[in-house]
Image (cartoon, rainbow, N blue to C red):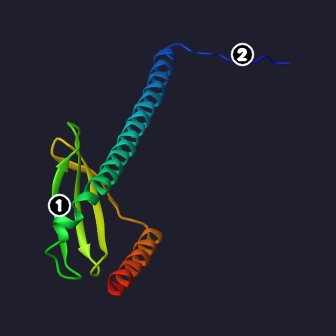
Amino acid sequence: MTRTTVIRNDRGMALPVALFALVVIGALVAGIFFTARIEIRSGENAMGGARAMEAAQAGLQMGASQVINVAGGLTVGSTGSIGKTQLGTTGSYYTDSVTKLNKFIYLLRSYGTYEVNGTVTSTRVVHPSSEQLRVAMLLADRMGALSSAT
């Protein structure tokens, strides 16, 4: 029986294994930073959208009292606007537009924006629902019937 000896020469393997481990760890750290950056941007976008929606809703509430002033001189089907208004010291703004639908009904739309350093990052539009418009039309119809009866 012959005996074979396996000669192992592991000398010099520590450096390539250590470099490979460093590359793998570096890739994992880079992936974590990339994921964190995406999460931060996603959160900023959600926050900007919420602020723009709040501005639009505030514009709808604040603009309701100004509808008659703005739309008084409008003809049926034409649109007037209320200027851009900032909410407090935030970057949230709203702009309202009023469209005269008939003698008694006006459609108010509010455009909310959120700006960072003068750049618009989010925009939302709010207007009354179709159910609110239906109720307004019924009320206007009844008001018209009441005014023509007197």
Residue closer to the observer: 127 or 23:
127
Image quarter of residue 1: top right
Residue at 50% of width from left, 15% of height from top?
14
What x and y, as percent, mark residue 76? 22, 82
Question: Farthest right residue?
Answer: 1
Could you tell me which secondary element the residue under label 2 belongs to? loop
| Mark toward the start of the polypeptide (2 vs 1) | 2
State the image coordinates of residue 70 (x, y, percent, origin top left): 17, 66
Could you classify mark 2 by the number of other residues whose Cα lies within 10 Å: few (under 14), some (14-19), or many (20 or more)? few
The residue lying toward the viewer, choosing from 105 and 49, is 105
Q: Quadrant of the C terminus?
A: bottom left
Which residue is pictured at 57% across the width and 15% down the height? Answer: 10
Task: Kindly identify which residue carries mark 1.
Answer: 82
Q: Is residue 36 above or below residue 57?
A: above
Q: Residue at x 20, y 74 (%)?
A: 79
In the rendered image, the vertical position of residue 2 relative to residue 64, given as above or below: above
Labelled pair 2, 1 in contact (Cβ < 8 Å): no
Please give left or right for residue 144 compared with residue 25 in the image: left
Q: Which residue is rendered at x = 41% and y = 74% of the image?
A: 139
Nearer to the camera, 66 or 146:
146
Numbered circle sitting on residue 5: 2
Cα gap from disc 2 to disc 1, whole angstroms:
93 Å
